Amino acid sequence: MMDWILQIAPAFAEAHAPALLILLPMLAGPIAAFLPGGGRVAWGMTVIVTGLCTLLSLILLAQVRSIEGGAIISYAMGGWAPPHGIEFRIDALNVLVLLLVSVIAFLTSIFGWPTIKAEIADGKRAMFFGAFQVCFMGLLGVAATGDAFNLFVFLELSSIATYVLVALGSGRDRRALPAAINYLLMGTIGASFYVVGVGFLYAATGTLNMADLAVQLQDVGGNRAVQVGFAFILVGLGLKAAMFPLHQWLPNAYSYSPSFVTAFLAATATKVAIYALVRFLFSVFSLDFAFEGMSLALILAPMGIAAMLACSFQAIFQADIRRTLAYSSVAQVGYMLLGISLGTAAGVSAGMFHLINHALMKGALFMAVAGAVLTYQGARIHDFAGLGRRAPWTMTAFAIAGLSLIGVPLTAGFQSKFALVSALLESGWWWAALIVVFSSVLAVIYMGRILEAVFFRAPTNPHKEHGEAPLLILVPLWILAIANIWVGIDGGFVYGLATDAAEALFIGGAS
Amino acid sequence: MAGPRTDHHVILRVVAKPLIPIIALFALYVHFHGDYSPGGGFQAGVIIVVAVVLYALIFGITPAMRAVPPVFARSLAALGFIIFAGVGVWALIMGGNFLDYDVLFNEEPGGHMGQHYGIIAVEVGVLFAVAGSMLSIFYAFAGRVTEIKDEDW
């Protein structure tokens, strides 16, 4: 179906796609940081690099899908064969994450220029784009690598760049600085937990390659060191993914960072951490281990449900729209974890499907908010009153993504919530399905508050002019909004990707 | 003797002056012995920065920033990153995988030139990157001016 991509792509790019995907932003980042021109040149370079990375991800997707059931592409770094050398291992699961991250990076970097120009000081813009490329490279690396320690290195690369990006929001709001420090402390604790966990696994098995770990762990069985390693990894990655009680860093980091960073992070950062979690839960460990089944049912599912309820309630009581959306992000992570915690192919594929759709809707929502904030420096609900008439294009896209977040039929959110509820009912968790529906009602309330103000209330200050967002923002915003509707009407392609991803995990797996 | 440039740190200065070049030299020793003995780019980068930090402690942060400007430190870090990745690209161009040193010089099988010089080039990248970033971090903390003036309290 996607063979035409393989026919037009150059052979060199096909042979080295996994390395090139990481290499492009790796080289471009340090160069971009020193480009002259007040950041304009660095921005152009960022758009080109993220665009090329999107093409490379498409090549990888075509390669993976060229074989029925999904090919596995293994790339040995430095010519050292795995399991001894570092391996980049692309299968149906992580090609999905690679594609998602690079498409979102491409769209947000097109959208980014007007907001960067407004929010970041002249001399810092080139460095900003340098840091963004490093963050982008790190996220791609986490998704691409097949080596547990290499994953830690990329996770730290992306996180350290993220702390810098969040802190740069201090030009607009000084509260970005404590938010960045808070994120730094929490993120570092998370990464340390992860690396301690990997240390335990290494001690138990003597290998760091994930595929090899999976084989070795079967022989070692569930001894105490393996259990402790599992617990550390679960908590560490849970922190990065903003799993319910470990999410405190997220709302501030999202509300005070530059708009560009918020849109990018909301759509990618937690998603990549969830990918890593899924990779460890189902691919490195497997459901054979009794402690894993227990932890899914007793930790992941209750935490997911708690996030869906508690954070949706918190979202209702926020005055700032960005904070509402940030709390809603934690709640949506709850949906994904609930799907994953079922431990069935249907559950995981529903979780992955919601992961993609959530990236589409949160990307669009934060872009629309950025567009509105750009022309009027306030992001409280009260500031958005009457904006529907002043900026109809921006706010219509906002409304589409908002409806998708609620899960109205004919939008992406409905498709993935439907898949989630079906998976829950299939496993007999009807009570959890009811909670999903109830939590969607909460989403109606918090999105409804915003939409009501935007479309039905008079402007609070009629003398202050709200304008339409510039074209550079509107185009990527509408691409995402239309993607929401397209997935909502014909979700086959994206759902197919998510199903392939889940199947890739369960082939040769335990159940 | 009691001129305007009196200072009671004269011994420190006299001792530090010959030490600084020796520290820098030792860094290079650690670097180039990295493939035979403990050491390598990372350690060497830190030791080089120690020389600059010592200079800054003894003679003040401003002269240190004049000798090694912050912009140079930042560029050095970026350059190191590019050297490292550049060796990988070189291997890619020569037809191998990313960072595959064996193909660097198109050797016969069994040749070790590529492995030898490849790792040294990569370590030079690490040396630059570590030295540049360490120094930037030091400057960022040491050169920090308080944003709230004392009178404002």
Image: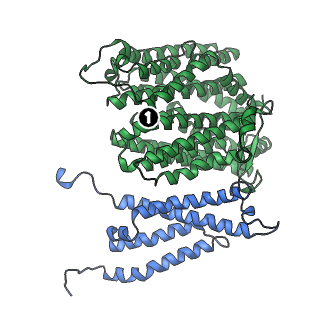
Disc 1 crowd, CA 10 A, few/some/many (<14, 14-19, 20+): many
Vertical placement of residue B93 versus A159, above or below: below
Q: Residue at x 52, y 30 (%)?
A: A244
Chain on which label 1 sits: A
Q: Residue at x 62, y 47 (%)?
A: A22
Vertical placement of residue B105 versus A378, above or below: below
Residue nearest the viewer, comparing A370 with A170: A370
- Seen as rendered, the residue at the extreme left is B151
- Camera sees residue A191: yes
- Camera sees residue A342: no
* Residue A318 placement (x, y as % from top left): 38, 24
Q: Residue at x 27, y 52 (%)?
A: B147
Pointer 1 residue: A254
Three-letter code, disc 1 = Tyr
Q: Residue at x 48, y 17 (%)?
A: A443
* Residue A302 placement (x, y as % from top left): 57, 25
Classify residue A395 by image quadrant: top left
Q: Is residue A98 left or right of residue A375?
A: right
Vertical placement of residue A394 versus A128, above or below: above
What colour is chain A?
A: green
Vertical placement of residue B21 versus A135, above or below: below
Classify residue A367 by image quadrant: top left
* Residue B18 placement (x, y as % from top left): 43, 83
Classify residue A411 by image quadrant: top right
* Residue A434 placement (x, y as % from top left): 58, 12
What colour is chain B?
A: blue
